[in-house]
Amino acid sequence: MGVLRNPDFRRLWLADLASQVGSRIDVLAVPLLAVTALGAPVFEVSLLRTAQALPYLVLGLQVGVWCDRIRHRPVLIAADAGRAVLIASVPVAALFGVLGMAQLLAVVLAVGVLSVFFDVAHQTYVPRLVAPAQLPEANARLQTNRSMAAVAGPGLAGVIVQALGVAAALAADAVSYLWSALWLRRIETPDTRPAPRERRLLREIGEGLRLVRGDRVLLAISAHGAVSSFFQSAHLAIVIVFLARDLGLSPWVIGVLGTASLTGAVTGGFTARWLGERIGQARALWGAAVLFGLAYQLYPFTGRGWALTCFVLAGFFTSYSVIVLSVFGVSFQQAVTPPELLGRVNAISQTLVYGVVPLGSLLGGALAGPIGMRATLHIAAAGVLASAAIMVWSPLRKLRDLTPADRR
């Protein structure tokens, strides 16, 4: 079982699994609710993803500084509890017939704010529970959670939506956040508060930025994440609408497609460490970036009948690549960053990746109207492929692994 023999990491792992499944449910359920129940046009649907990611752009760097000043477990528990209450308000409002697009946008925005705190604190908390040598395994376990949720979530959401309605799917999402909070409360490792120091927000943010800028590998990983995320967000902002309206697929079929296509994430979660040992962590990183870009080219060719295979194949290889990129990128970041700066560096990388999501989502929604959704998917795919050049032409190209000896 390796790192799962650590009881506190096991509790964190179980909490993360519940939270990831819930998050994957609302990825499908929220836009479907907007499309089916509220009749929202494609641009308004894209605004939902924009609202969800906007807090990373506005608050991400500040949250990194705050997480380097405080204990992390209370932040994680409070964020889970808050998200449960917010998500639960949607099915309650739907039950009484008062749900509108304004409330849905407000809930998504507030959940996004809490998710910024949760994601930064969570990634910073892991090195406090496991030894440095166990970080790749620990991150692989957590990424496997993400991959399992990626496979189970869309299918589960599709079945719940088809059988009980979208409101029931969101209620299940709220329960998953509560389940996560309960597991986090059981962690026993002391969560000590960092030593007090002089507090100057801009200077503290600058310290994290200088560390990322000064490490060319860390900078390449962060830059690739930002550029690929921008174009991926343009794709994600419209793809559910494309499948539902242009192809006329039912929620159940969309859920099954998501489950089938994301089996690559499970494969990545179980094989990422083996791949790093076999070909080297650095080669795995830039190779995954190239595969990610190439696989994205299949999405725009999705159609009815056998052409749905394009969606499944694209999803398999893109989700596999994302897991490999995450396992080695996050492990490297945690290993090279001093503990007192880890919250800020984590926040910088997440701000770069998620902070561009509102811009990419707006681009997808804005282009889909005048040029059509399929053409917009082609533009998004081309951008994702172009982002791979950042990794290929970085120092990673000359490295096998990411140990200090290999990087000299």
Image (cartoon, grey):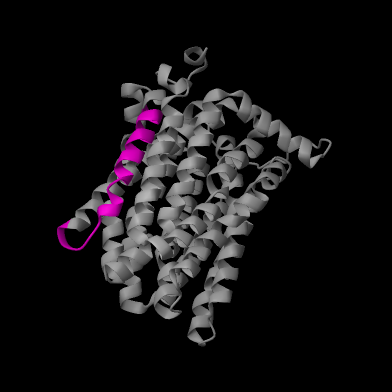
Going by the picture, which residue comes out furthest to the front? Answer: 370
Whether residue 92 appears in magenta in the rendering, the answer is no
Q: Is residue 256 above or below residue 228?
A: below
- Our reading of the magenta stretch's main secondary structure is helix
User: Picture coordinates of residue 196 (x, y %)?
Assistant: 81, 37
Range of residues picked out in magenta: 284-306
Q: Is residue 314 above or below residue 341?
A: below
Q: Quadrant of residue 136?
A: top left
- Regarding residue 330, the answer to whether it shows in the image is no
User: Picture coordinates of residue 157 (x, y %)?
Assistant: 36, 66
User: Picture coordinates of residue 321 (x, y %)?
Assistant: 35, 39
Q: Quadrant of residue 198?
A: top right
Q: Residue at x 22, y 60 (%)?
A: 303
Q: Is residue 346 above or below residue 95?
A: above
Looking at the picture, tell me which residue is in the foreground, 384 or 181: 384
User: Picture coordinates of residue 92 (x, y %)?
Assistant: 52, 80
In the figure, is residue 299 to the left or right of 308?
right
Looking at the picture, tell me which residue is in the foreground, 191 or 197: 197
Looking at the picture, tell me which residue is in the foreground, 385 or 67: 385
- Regarding residue 274, the answer to whether it shows in the image is yes
Looking at the picture, tell me which residue is in the foreground, 174 or 178: 174
Going by the picture, which residue comes out furthest to the right? Answer: 198
Q: Quadrant of residue 287?
A: top left
